Amino acid sequence: MVTLAEVARQAGVSPSTVSYVLSGKRAISEPTRARVEQAISDLGYHPNAGARALAGKRSHIIALVVPLRTDVYVPIMMEIAIAVTMAARQYGYDVLLITNDEGPEGVRRVAASGLADGVVLMDVELEDERIPVLRELGSHAAMIGLPADAHGLACVDHDFTAAGALCADHLADLGHRDVAFVGYAPQVYRRHAGYAERTLTGFRERAAARGLRILHRPCEGTYESTAGTLARILEDRPATTGFVVQNEGALGPLLSLLRGSGRIVPEDASVVALCPEQLAEQNSPRLTAVTGPAQELGRQAVELVMSRIDGGAPPEITLLTPVLTVRESTGPGPFPVR
Amino acid sequence: MVTLAEVARQAGVSPSTVSYVLSGKRAISEPTRARVEQAISDLGYHPNAGARALAGKRSHIIALVVPLRTDVYVPIMMEIAIAVTMAARQYGYDVLLITNDEGPEGVRRVAASGLADGVVLMDVELEDERIPVLRELGSHAAMIGLPADAHGLACVDHDFTAAGALCADHLADLGHRDVAFVGYAPQVYRRHAGYAERTLTGFRERAAARGLRILHRPCEGTYESTAGTLARILEDRPATTGFVVQNEGALGPLLSLLRGSGRIVPEDASVVALCPEQLAEQNSPRLTAVTGPAQELGRQAVELVMSRIDGGAPPEITLLTPVLTVRESTGPGPFPVR
DNA sequence: TTGTAGGCGTTATCAG
DNA sequence: CTGATAACGCCTACAA
């Protein structure tokens, strides 16, 4: 293994000089820097991570805690994880993957051992058990999602309330009056998942303001459950012409079922999805959808952690604005405005 | 920060004794061990990861290199990544997430710096650029997927050839004669992705042996492309009654389209999917499917890496046997056997 | 602008 | 069964 000392010898300088050209923490004359860099590449030197962590009191690693639960749309989790990793690299950091089956102890382990300099928590719950641990250790952390008490924390999430409101507005603008919200599985609401509740709240409030009559129906997201959900909606409110869908699994089935029941989208029924662009694009008709910037979530989380590592005091809550993109699945409703 | 030395003082023993009760590398008398463990928990001691890596020449970290490409079914990637992480924990290892945008240099970086003791490569290509780097560094590695030259490596993958053959056999057994294979996007075959080609080979050979007439059609996996693919299949071979689908995105649309065209599954057409169980279960009808054990892939990869780290010489190639589960999407074809 | 030297917290060798 | 102590490779305050 090539060490810094060998590089120094080869370049005819002292070890500290090599260290400094690497870290850039002090001025180095051009010729010296050149000789050192030459030696580094000649020898194929790579600084030893363990030694660096020990001496520098910084592992240059952040931990990313991912949920095991699968009721969140997995591709999005992956997209965020990858965005976190790439963003971290920009800061010279690597990402350690922690699965939530370790529970709060996993966080304690990596933080207390100095394995990780910071932590990004995905899928944060309202009363998240990992947060007290973080607080106790004084760890540098960022949450993706909003806990009930964000005091002194750094959280970033989609503005789901705004997303729900966008859906209501869009359908109201088009002249729909009876609208159904097809949501996630009942257990998601039962455990008060923040994203589900906030979306619903945003939707409900805006719907009320716009005079929409609404129905909220949880849905497992399989074909069969979607069929059941749709049947119930049409039975309860036959006049329903607008659908807001926050359940990735239910989208394909719903379109298929509407088609099967003779309802043409968007002439007879409008569908607004809360989903990533890719999913919106690959359905037929392509879906009008409200999308939040998943990659941006990951990037921002990393920036929050880095800011804390550097001793900064970033904002407690950052909400990212979702965007509604009109595609082919929404059209005029039965009550045209003006 | 609590150090080993402080624990030693508190327990009234020498630092080395503390180290040994932790590592278990030499016998310790019961009373001593008890005092040390007491001190550890009293002080809340956690060994410093950097120091441990430096002194022990072992970071207790393995790197997991994930692809950025999205034409592989993402939930499976995630499942494997999580399985790798959990399996690694069983060995006292953590997992560092490396995205493939760093290319081969990412692997070099973590291996050469001693950041990772071993590497797991996902989505290995036939001529994978990362393999020469691994060979050059003499790194402890395992591949998920099969490269063209597996000499001296440790690889694990699904037995896609067997999976393809299972599909052909099942449909032949049911009395189907004209069968179409709906595959991944054209570019997947163009870059000679091993899993796609091996599945096709296994399918083709068994189909030939069983006297099936087959058609292979790549498919993008969107609704529209699936519609085009199906239309073309039915035009080219109107007598087609069996479908083998190796494209997760095409499954929902295909079922919907068959229904729309008046073909009842499984009475008029049989569909065999190559996909995870969850996906097979959530379609309607529930799909007869060939599934490989994704979690097992991850677990085995970890075992291969650990074996190499411990100086073992694990098998070069491990293939995991897929299983065909009969559900509701396949039934008798037009040429009943006997 | 560059060099010297002490220390970071563990491991493991060598004594006892 | 237990204790000293010398590495491990790098960082950084202090000197020059």
Image (cartoon, coloured by chain):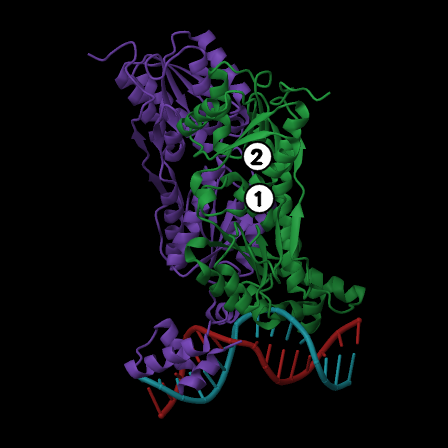
Chain colours: A green, B purple, C red, D cyan
Q: Secondary structure at mark 2?
A: loop
Q: Chain of mark 2?
A: A
Q: Residue A326: percent from the left, percent from the top?
A: 66, 27
Image quadrant holding the C terminus of chain A, namely: top right
User: Circle 1: is it few (<14), some (14-19), or many (20+) Cα within 10 Å?
Assistant: some
Residue corresponding to mark 2: A275
Q: Amino acid at mark 2?
A: Cys
Mark 2–mark 1 CB contact (< 8 Å): no
Residue appearing at x 55%, y 47% in the figure: A81
Residue A166 visible at all: yes
Between residue A256 and residue B215, name the one nearer to us: A256
Locate the N terminus of chain A and report the quarter of the image it occupies: bottom right
Find residue B296 and report its horizontal and vertical position in percent: 36, 44
Chain bearing mark 1: A
Give the vertical position of A224 relative to A127 (above or below): above
Q: Is residue B240 above or below residue B117?
A: above
The amino acid pointed to by label 1 is Arg
Q: Nearer the viewer, residue A290 or A42?
A: A290
- Return the residue at label 1: A198
